[in-house]
Image (tube, rainbow, N blue to C red):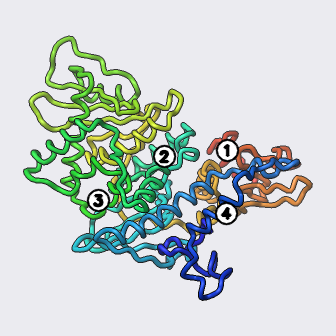
């Protein structure tokens, strides 16, 4: 009932989930909401009990949670359109019938095609949704990520990896919008209650108001983009899709960085470029011995996420903005959310914005402008589409690209342990195990390791020797 695909069409139920259990005349009185309320009353105190052999407790449910988030987004997209000057239609994706393709048309405005799980192989990432404008060629696509805290925010290594890949997507010409579970759930609740979410931009109301006034002054008039500072994250995204004027969004980013900067400490600096790198590494800029023409304004969001704005005295424009999530300290859900939400807006500064983590700032990938069209995944790499553990998949992709394609996903050895090898090269007896796998790495004749125990070079060397 909670997962049925009829929700993507905004329907209260269908014969797959509810209607098959009632008579034809009762269908108008059946709804998903009522069914779930009844089930919650019937099953109020159920708890999971660990299996005696430990066969259930080791299952990683983070991807299930992610699927629930994606399902909610699809429902939200459909319901949002019914209350706004837009229309959403959906159909099975011709390339993969298990996925949905949406057509979003704004009244007297842009038209977008939104696809699920579009694989951007060249950047090593697969956004949950990927929006491409169909009524105006050359418009930047939008990569939409739905980030749950358990899967994305809690693991600092994954935060680093997300930041690196998404910087590459931005560098390739696409916008990147990230929504958290709270963003999607909150927007869906607000729609159901016919209310509006509070502003998600983590700056004080005075700063937001000042930024809006500054943007209007800079542009000479108002623009729909300027309302984004008072909206929730999903409504911000819809505002961008409805009014994707890059110049207006850049103006909003300029004044938002400046307005935030005025609330922080100002450091006169000798070398602005060096100060930017210093702040991106998580340190304070070294102040000049005297006042200079360049300065860094270091500020914080409402939950403590540090940002910095580089300026040139006498100039009303932002010279640079730095938003680096500190991965050298314990992660924090609210600070992580602030980092994501500010990044959605400051990205429109383009090359003047560094949206990264403190451990990645000096190793940002060298980004060569790429086509805004997503690269089609190779047939060999399609072998890895069923691998959910990204660490395993990343290693396996390296091997596949090196030509080692004689692999199997979920390879079953058939011994007494009865636990499959996540990715195996059977002829070479080499495999990558999911972290925490019950299978030991000592299966006779096999070289089995968890991702952290392999390096890319070691894996390639072993496969080269044994598959030769």
Per the model, the C-alpha gap separating discs 1 and 3 is 41 Å
Q: Earlier in the sequence, mark 4 or mark 1?
A: 4
Helix, strand or loop at mark 2: helix
Helix, strand or loop at mark 3: helix
Circle 2 is placed at which residue position?
162
The mark tally for this picture is: 4
Helix, strand or loop at mark 4: helix
Task: Report crowding for label 1: few under 14, some 14 to 19, many 20 or more residues within 10 A (C-alpha).
Answer: many
Instruction: Judge left or right: residue 49 versus residue 3.
Output: right
Circle 1 is placed at which residue position?
451
Per the model, the C-alpha gap separating discs 4 and 1 is 41 Å
List x then y, in percent, for residue 388: 63, 56
Q: Nearer the viewer, residue 184 or 93?
A: 184
**Residue shown at the point (34%, 57%) measured from the top left:** 235
Q: Residue furthest top?
A: 289
Residues at discs 1 and 2 in contact (Cβ within 8 Å): no
- Against 256, residue 312 (above or below) is above
Q: Earlier in the sequence, mark 1 or mark 3?
A: 3
Residues at discs 2 and 3 in contact (Cβ within 8 Å): no
Helix, strand or loop at mark 1: helix
Circle 3 is placed at which residue position?
239
Q: Earlier in the sequence, mark 1 or mark 2?
A: 2
Instruction: Judge left or right: residue 256 versus residue 101.
Output: left
Per the model, the C-alpha gap separating discs 2 and 4 is 37 Å
List x then y, in percent, for residue 309: 26, 32
Task: Report crowding for label 3: few under 14, some 14 to 19, many 20 or more residues within 10 A (C-alpha).
Answer: some
Circle 4 is placed at which residue position?
39
């Amino acid at each position: 009932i909670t997962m049925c695909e009829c929700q993507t069409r905004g329907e209260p139920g269908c014969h797959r989930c509810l209607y098959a259990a009632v008579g034809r005349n009762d269908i108008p009185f059946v709804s998903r909401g009522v069914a779930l309320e009844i089930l919650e009353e019937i099953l109020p105190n159920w708890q999971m009990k660990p299996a005696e052999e430990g066969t259930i407790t080791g299952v990683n449910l983070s991807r299930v949670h992610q699927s629930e988030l994606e399902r909610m987004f699809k429902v939200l997209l459909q319901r949002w359109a019914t209350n706004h000057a837009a229309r959403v239609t959906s159909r099975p994706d011709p390339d993969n019938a298990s996925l949905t393709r949406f057509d979003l048309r704004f009244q007297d405005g842009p038209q977008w095609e939104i696809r699920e799980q579009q694989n951007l192989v060249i950047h090593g990432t697969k956004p949950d949704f990927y929006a491409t404008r169909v009524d105006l060629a050359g418009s930047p696509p939008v990569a939409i990520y739905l980030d749950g805290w358990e899967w994305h925010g809690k693991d600092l290594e994954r935060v680093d990896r997300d930041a690196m890949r998404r910087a590459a997507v931005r560098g390739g010409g696409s916008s990147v919008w990230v929504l958290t579970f709270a963003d999607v759930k909150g927007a869906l609740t607000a729609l159901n209650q016919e209310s509006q979410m509070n502003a998600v931009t983590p700056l004080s109301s005075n700063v937001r108001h000042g930024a809006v006034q500054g943007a209007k002054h800079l542009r000479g008039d108002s623009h729909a983009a300027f309302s984004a500072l008072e909206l929730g994250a999903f409504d911000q995204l819809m505002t961008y899709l409805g009014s994707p004027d890059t110049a207006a969004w850049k103006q909003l980013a300029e004044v938002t960085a400046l307005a935030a900067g005025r609330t922080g400490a100002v450091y006169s600096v000798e070398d602005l470029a060096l100060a930017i790198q210093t702040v991106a590494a998580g340190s304070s800029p070294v102040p000049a011995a005297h006042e200079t023409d360049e300065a860094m304004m270091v500020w914080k969001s409402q939950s403590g996420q540090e940002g910095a704005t580089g300026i040139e005295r006498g100039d009303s424009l932002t010279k640079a903005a730095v938003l680096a999530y500190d991965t050298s300290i314990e992660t924090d859900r609210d600070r992580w959310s602030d980092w994501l939400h500010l990044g959605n807006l400051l990205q429109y500064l383009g090359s003047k914005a560094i949206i990264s983590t403190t451990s990645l700032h000096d190793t940002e990938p060298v980004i060569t402008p790429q086509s805004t069209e997503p690269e089609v995944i190779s047939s060999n790499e399609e072998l890895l589409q069923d691998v959910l553990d990204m660490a395993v998949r990343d290693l396996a992709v390296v091997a596949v690209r090196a030509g080692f394609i004689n692999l199997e996903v979920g390879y079953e050895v058939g011994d007494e342990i009865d636990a499959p090898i996540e990715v195996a090269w059977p002829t070479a007896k080499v495999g990558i195990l999911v972290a925490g796998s019950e299978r030991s790495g000592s299966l006779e004749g096999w070289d089995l390791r968890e991702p952290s125990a392999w390096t890319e070079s070691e894996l390639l060397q072993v496969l080269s020797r044994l598959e030769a």
